[in-house]
Amino acid sequence: MLVGHYAPALSARRVAPEAPLWALFLAAQAVDILYFGLVFGGIEAASLHPGEVPKFEVAHGVWSHSLAMTAVYGGGALAAGRMLGWGRAGVALAAVLVSHWLLDLVVHVPDLPLALDQASAVGFGLWRMPLVAMGLEIALVAGSTAWLIARVPERPARLLRRGRRGVVGRTLTHFGSDPNRSLSRCHSEFSKVQPSEGVTGAMR
Ligand SMILES: [Zn+2]
C-alpha cells in the first residue's frame, strides 16, 4: 500500500487532535522508511519483477515488515508515549504505526512474515488487481480526509466570534483607547447622526 497508509494517520488526527499531523504521517510510513534503510544497508531485500503484477515484492523483510517486529515497534511507541506523557497522542502514534502492517497485509502478495522467518510470510495479494487496489487506496484517503474535515463544524462559528471581536476591537481603536475619550467621541459622533432623538439628551 502506498498513499492508503496516510488514511489511519488522518483518522487518528481526528481522534487525537493534539498529535501533530507530520508525526502521524511519519508513524504511518515508519515501517517502509526502516525497510528501505535496511535494503540499502544490505540487511533486508526487495525483488523487482518488471512487466509483472505486482512489480515489487519484499524478498526479505523480517525486521521491518514482520507482524512480530511491528508489534514490538508499536509497543515501544506506546511505552515511549506513556513515559513522555503524550497521552492520547502516544496511543494514536502507536496505533498508526501498527496499521501499516495491517494495510500491507491486504495488498501485498504473501511476503509479510508473521515471525522472524520469511517463510511464514502472508498477504492477501490485492496488488494483483491494480485498479481495485488503487480504488481502495483513494477511497481510504478520501474517506479519512472527509472524516477529519467533518470534525470542525464549529469553525465557521469560531471565525464569526473572532470576526465580532475584531469589529469591537476596531471600533474601540477608532474611538481611542482612553475609555472617557472614547465615550465623549462616541457621544459627539452619535449626536451628529441623530441630534433630535432623546437618546442624546439622556447621554448628556
Ligand atoms: Zn510496507
Image (cartoon, rainbow, N blue to C red):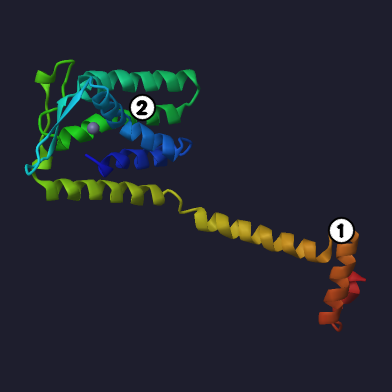
Q: Earlier in the sequence, mark 1 or mark 2?
A: 2
Name the residue beneath numbered marker 2. 94
Per the image, label 2 sits on a secondary structure element best described as helix
In the image, is 162 to the left or to the right of 157? Answer: right
Q: Residue at x 9, y 37 (%)?
A: 49
Q: Nearer the viewer, mark 1 or mark 2?
A: 2
For mark 1, give the secondary structure: helix
Residue 99, percent across and down? Answer: 27, 32
Number of dots carrying numbers = 2
Mark 1 vs mark 2, CA separation in Å: 54 Å
Residue 108 visible (yes or no):
yes
Q: Position of residue 71 (x, y in %)?
A: 27, 20
- Residue 198 position within the rendered picture, expressed as x and y whole percent measured from the top left: 86, 78
Q: Answer whether labels 1 and 2 touch (C-beta < 8 Å).
A: no
- Residue 67 falls in which quadrant of the image? top left
* Residue 103 located left or right of residue 6: left
Query: What residue lies at 27% left-to-right and 29% top-to-bottom?
Result: 36
Camera-side residue: 1 or 198?
A: 1
